[in-house]
Amino acid sequence: MSVMKTSMRNFFAHKGRMALSAIAVMLSVAFVTGTLVFTDTMGTTFDKLFAATSSDVTVSAAGDEPDEMSRTGRPDSLPASLVKEVAAVEGAKSAEGAVSSMDVTVVDRDNENMGSSTGAPTIAGNWTRNDLRSMEITSGHAPRGPAQVMVDADTADKHGLKLGDELRTITVGGDITARIVGIASFKVTNPGAAVVFFDTATAQRGLLGATGRYTQVNVTAEAGVSDTRLKRNVTSALAALKAEQGAKGAQETAYKVRTQQETADASRSDVDEFMNVIKYGMLGFAGIAFLVGVFLIINTFSMLVAQRTREIGLMRAVGSSRGQVNRSVLVEATLLGVLGSLVGVGAGVGLAVGLMKLMSAVGMELSTRDLTVRWTTPAIGMLLGIVVTVLASYLPARRAGKVSPMAALRDAGTPADGRAGLLRGLVGLVLTGAGAFALYLAATADQAKQGSLVLGVGIVLSLIGFVVIGPLLAGGVVRVLSAVLLRAFGPVGRMAERNALRNPRRTGATGAALMIGLALVACLSVVGSSMVTSATAELDKSVGADFIVTAGNGGKPLNPATVEAIEGVDGLAHVTRMKETPAKVTAPDGTSESESLLAAEPTYAEDLRRETVSGDLAAAYGADAMSVGSEFAEKAGLKVGDTLTVAFDGGRTAKLRLAAITSDDTGLDQGAMYTNLTTVERYVPAERLPLDTALLAKADEGGKDEAYAALKTAVAKDPTVQVMDQTDYKEALQDQVGQLLNMVYGLLALAIVVAILGVVNTLALSVVERTREIGLMRAIGLSRRQLRRMIRLESVVIALFGALLGLGLGMGWGATAQRLLALEGLEVLDIPWPTIIGVFVGSAFVGLLAALVPAFRAGRMNVLNAIATD
């Protein structure tokens, strides 16, 4: 019989036993395929949007970048006269000025924010002919006066807006209150941005602070003129204009000229960063699922080979070579990989559609019309599924090839690997020891960057070491667990213990699959809990302010009207304004660093207590003075009294005296450079001065509650502004870390599900392997109930074995990672014992769940047929 025929016969004869392994392959491939389809679809959506919204050639200010908020609250702008200059360029059919800004907040009559809840921008501008590329007015008309506004249809649908409703747009120049006179629908998918349109004069006054200015000029090419040629002509015309301005002694304006494709690419580059985080993060978790699936596949084929020992021995006796037996098993694995991967690719597309629906439900619109399945996606999924399956089956196949013809005389299923070999144990101990040593080096590292690399090596080595040494650990750990948990169940418990110890390699591999997922859960739990506890302790130690006021909207600065309202609140001892001002700081020895100077009022030193290495921090807020962090001071060889050269972005260059060096051994404002607000205002023009990033406030003695309420009232007109006391701030931090961890746990759930399938498969195949034994036990008086209990207890002890190893390993990783975080100022190690204990107890229930079907099938066995099984 040929190898292929033998493989096909064996595969379909054991198709039920292969099913769970196929599901593991399918889930892993589906996760990879779904991730690629989902991110490719997002890319297609944004590509279509950016292509549709970009004109043939766009002229903007040199410092302008698409999809960025301005530090000043107003985007860079161009003179309106430029429109006529560009329109006269050879090859230009028309040119028009456009106004656009993301530094706005739009609220309805009930003061509810109309912006996206997913981080997509809120965009305000004027309605132009270029907008007709991507939108069409489906209700009402375009705005024709200062009291009229048009809104996009997606935002109108989400918030129930209709013609005649009132909207208030909060800008740096004041509020624009207008009624909706039109609704425009996107011709392409809008991922979630909220868009409002005004007439040109209103948009210029409200968004730019003056008429006669535009943020960009959109140029349309004549028929037959390429974008590249038009860009070249526009660039030449602008160069001539700059030369003319220079000859007249006028201030020259720098321009940026882009083709439609260049504008779309520039916009896409920012989106790519976000999508890559999603893509590679999800692929990382898919890789973990694949790794867990490897153990399931190894166990499946190892047990199938053990059960077919006599059959393989007979094949060897009648002339099959080692290579043929080996290839037979590998062909079975290939069939498993192909079938599992095929189903996984289809499931992956369904998963991507499900993710799109989920994102739409939370506010990020993605349409199935843009569903993108590149040929490489199923190819990658199939290749990964097949390769991983075949590689995982190699060791069992090699073991099958070593079966001798004499094995035909032995009982089938006799385990050939009752205890792990000496070599395996030595290798496992060496790897584990090397991993532990790497973790020790990481924990004692002086720099976080180098330490993180060593930590990665330690995690990988210790994980592999625990996997290799798992069979040796199984004997001792299972005996301890059994003594604590199983002995109370009498003979049934002792039989469950012996079954778990019968094949340490199998138990070790099954427990290792669960160990990987739970190790990551434990590690992240320790890191997350330590981050929150450390930050809380740092707040208690360093923050003297009673209140923190932020825009709470993706780093958006505070509106001047909000700052003015807060400064007018009664019951406050002081209010500290702070700005982040881009600047290049150069030391006397030439060492330079591009930093954002933190310009604040002198009371900032009271609101945030910073330890100084030398000098007096209060002096840094004096005239033409500043402070730097200890790391920069050490690198540049600085001492108090030195003079630093500070080139302010958008302003003049200053010579500032170093008045203090602050310690970077902190989690707050690490590496910050401080100076006085008045100093920055002296060197940076008012129109280029950044808005306040946050405010700190101190209440009068005994009036904290009243001041808190008054601050809430003062900022009520802008729903994006957050007023937090220290308790609020700690809760917000805890919520942020908690949401991130919950998302990671959700992704890790895939690996844990695959590990549970591994436990189910091990038990199911183990029951088949022990069919005759089970029949004999039933014949001498073991009841169905006792049999099922025995299998459930065996499952529980295997699950707890994996959980114990995983949680212990994960806590070690987490504690090491916390020591690296201590170098960044997060110095408190906090083990979340409720989470750890909860996961351990939950693992017992996982074991019970995994044993339900195998135990039920074992209980239904016919006793006589089981005894007669060969």
Image (spheres, helix red, strand yellow):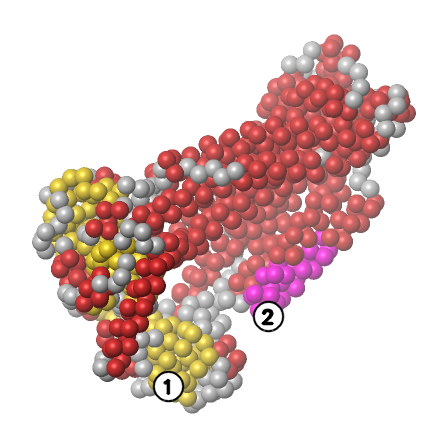
Question: In the drawing, does residue 519 fall left or right of residue 201?
Answer: right
Q: Quadrant of the N terminus?
A: top right
Discs 2/1, front: 1
Q: Is residue 585 visible?
A: yes
- Tell me the magenta residue range: 432-455
In the rendered image, residue 658 lying in the magenta stretch gets the answer no
For this orientation, the residue located farthest to the top is 864
For this orientation, the residue located farthest to the bottom is 641
Badge count: 2
Give yes or no for contact between labels 2 and 1 (Cβ–Cβ under 8 Å): no
Q: Nearer the viewer, residue 307 or 515?
A: 307
Q: Nearer the viewer, residue 420 or 78?
A: 78
Q: Position of residue 57 (x, y in %)?
A: 31, 57
Q: Please name the residue shown 65% across and 56% down the image.
A: 458
Q: Position of residue 556 (x, y in %)?
A: 30, 61
Question: In the drawing, does residue 478 fall left or right of residue 244?
Answer: right
Q: Earlier in the sequence, mark 2 or mark 1?
A: 2
The amino acid on which the numbered mark 2 sits, given as a three-letter code, is: Asp
Q: Please name the residue shown 45% across and 76% down the image.
A: 593
Q: Please name the residue shown 31% across and 44% down the image.
A: 190
**Up/down of 618 relative to 9, above or below:** below
**Residue tagged 2:** 446
Helix, strand or loop for disc 2: loop
Gap in Å between the C-alphas at discs 2 and 1? 31 Å
Quadrant of res 161: top left
Q: Position of residue 678 (x, y in %)?
A: 27, 80
Question: In the drawing, does residue 269 fall left or right of residue 759?
Answer: left
Q: Main secondary structure of the magenta part?
A: helix
The amino acid on which the numbered mark 1 sits, given as a three-letter code, is: Leu
The circle on residue 656 is: 1
